[in-house]
Structure formats: C-alpha cells, structure tokens
Image (cartoon, rainbow, N blue to C red):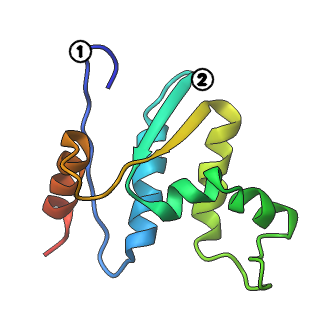
Amino acid sequence: MRGDYQKEISGGLANTTNNVMELTAVIEALRLVKYPCKIKVYSDSAYVVNAFLQGWIYNWIKKGWKTADGNLVKNKELWETLYQFTKTHQIEFIKVKGHSDNAFNNRCDELARNAIPN
C-alpha cells in the first residue's frame, strides 16, 4: 500500500508447504517493486521475519547455507532470492501476530485461502 494506492496479488501451488508459500508471497510482492526504495514487510510468518530479525539468514550464508546443527537450509533458492531483494531495497521485516484481527493480515489470509488449488 502506498498512499491511497493498494495492489493485491495472490497465488498458490499444489503439493507445497506453508513455509514455501510464505517465502514465495514476500518474493512475489517484492518483484512488483520497480525502483529501489524503503519497504516494510509485515508478516505473521515467524519463519520469514525471524530469519532477518534474529540474523539466521546471515549465519546461514556465512556457513555455506547450513543451519547451526550443520544441516542444509531448506528452501535455499527462495532464501537466496529474498536475500537479493535486501541488496536492492531497504527492507524492514515486522512480525504481526497471526489471527489477532489485523485487517491486512486477515485480508492476506483470505487471499491465501482463496488461492489454494482445488
């Protein structure tokens, strides 16, 4: 949302995971931004937000995309894509409590439910 302008997008994939879709949602939204700018990403996904707020992603990169216990990071390609957007834009990740009656979060949930393939 910018000023009075608001754009909604949605989509879905068959045979996927919640984590993949949460990452994909942020990536696809960022793909629509045409020029480098400051962006606030609000999400109820601890998976996405904490990767940046708690520095997980920076440690994964340092360790060759391995977790603290030495396992390969799941969804590496998506994380790499999202990380590249942080090189273009100034992105602030903000955690929103899920199901807390936030109008934008409720709308996102509705769009996500409607995009689930039958």
For the point 77% across and 56% down, the residue is 58
Left or right, 12 with respect to 55, comes to left
> Mark 1 — residue?
4
User: What is the crowding at mark 2: few (fewer than 14 residues within 10 Å), some, or many (at least 20)?
Assistant: few
What kind of residue is marked 2? Answer: Pro
Q: Nearer the viewer, residue 5 or 69?
A: 69
Q: How many marks?
A: 2
Quadrant of res 99: bottom left
**Helix, strand or loop under label 2:** loop
Quadrant of res 54: bottom right
Image x and y of residue 100, in percent: 23, 53
Is 82 above or below relative to 45? above
Image x and y of residue 96, in percent: 37, 49
**On residue 36, which mark appears?**
2
Q: Rounded to the nearest whole Å, what is the CA distance between mark 2 and mark 1?
A: 20 Å
**Helix, strand or loop under label 1:** loop
For the point 62% across and 50% down, the residue is 53
**Sooner in the amino-acid sequence: mark 2 or mark 1:** 1
